[in-house]
Amino acid sequence: MPMTRRDFLRTSGASAAALGLAAPALAQDLRPLRMVLNWTYQGPQSWFFLAEDNGYFADAGIEMVIDQGSGSGAAVGSVAGGAYDVGFGDVNALIRLASTEPEDAPLCVYQMYNAPPFTVAVLSSSDIMTAADLEGRLLGGAANDGALKLFPAFANLAGIDTSGIEILNFQSNLREQMLKSEQVEGVFGYVNTIRFSAKLSGMNPDEEIRFIKFGDYGMDLYSNGLIIPKALAEESPDLVSGMVAAINRGVADTLADPEAAIEAVARREPLINREVELERLMATLTDEMNHPELAVTGLGNVDPERFATSIDIVVEADGLPRTPAPEEIFSDAFLPPESERIYKLI
């Protein structure tokens, strides 16, 4: 059987170790790639760091540099614009881009968040109880926030009159404080991002925050996945498959030892609150990655019918000029073999 690139790297690495040679000789064979995350270093990014720390990227011939991001939507644009080779971004932002600029749109090759996390968070003490109550309110969020970008689509589905709604943009790190101090009446974000950032700010989110969830109004969408340029998929398919396999192994390691996963995050950001980030990680696994389809599709894959419907929802709600075909948005060609996929998270 021919020796694969992975076999070569392992063999050459073992030989170097046996001869007492330093690792840089091996590192010269690695393909540098830059990844941008959806947000700052937090518990739910642990699988990327474990893939790096445990040598899975190196096994795949990759030297991965992982940068913090400024929003799930921004990650898609960063890949499309050529600033990054890989992004952990919102597939709905990818749908919008593929509709309007198909030649520039990247491709999702590993769908990770399969349940809709999008929300408008309001104070429990407010009189905002339902989506209809958002009419005429002052809302706020980061410009690149995935939930904010989906709000026109959500408003259309929920029958909200947006003419009287004012939206204030501010930096993401100000979101919970802006809500707590009542400078805005609601903020956009992912449920668990807001929940645990609020907890870090001293709030009790279970008592002080109410979530108006997009999914409760028929927006059964996928969200974050691994996004790459189509050129990378076409020119280096083995590299892409190796990268996806590395991240899949990182997820498996996270499930096996969540506390070790949080330590991997802490090595990048020592000031994190480990207890809160562990809670955030477990809540993400439970709420944003544990759709019932997982038991059939495996993590990274999509249900074809549901995925096609989700594209239709975004296109219709946003009034986009064309409906991208599902294969323009997602490819399962780079997923691990079915026997290596993850079918249960909790």
Image (cartoon, rainbow, N blue to C red):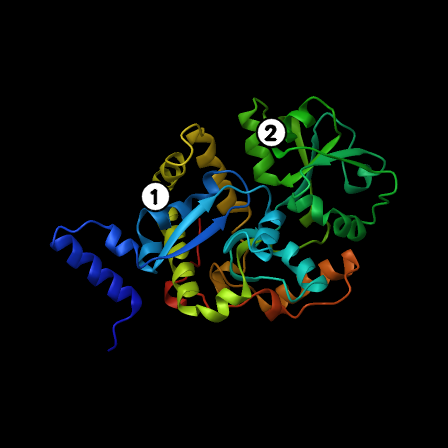
Name which residue lies at 26% across and 51% down.
Answer: 24
Q: Residue at x 68, y 26 (%)?
A: 178
Circles 2 and 1: CB atoms closer than 8 Å: no
What amino acid does circle 1 point to? Answer: Asp
Q: CA distance from mark 2 to mark 1?
A: 26 Å
The spot of residue 130 in percent (x, y) is 77, 39
From this view, report whether residue 303 is shown above or below residue 38: below
In the picture of the structure, the residue carrying the numbered disc 2 is 205
Viewer can see residue 101:
yes
Q: Is residue 162 above or below residue 222?
A: above
- Dot 1 alpha-carbon crowd within 10 angstroms: few under 14, some 14 to 19, many 20 or more: few
User: Does residue 223 appear in this view?
Assistant: no
Q: Quadrant of residue 313?
A: bottom right
Could you say which quadrant of the image residue 341 lies in? bottom left
Give the residue number, with chain letter if any, for mark 1. 257
Residue 278: give x, y in percent of width and height: 44, 36
Q: Is residue 125 left or right of residue 94?
A: right
Q: Nearer the viewer, residue 68 or 127?
A: 68
SS class of the residue under badge 2?
helix
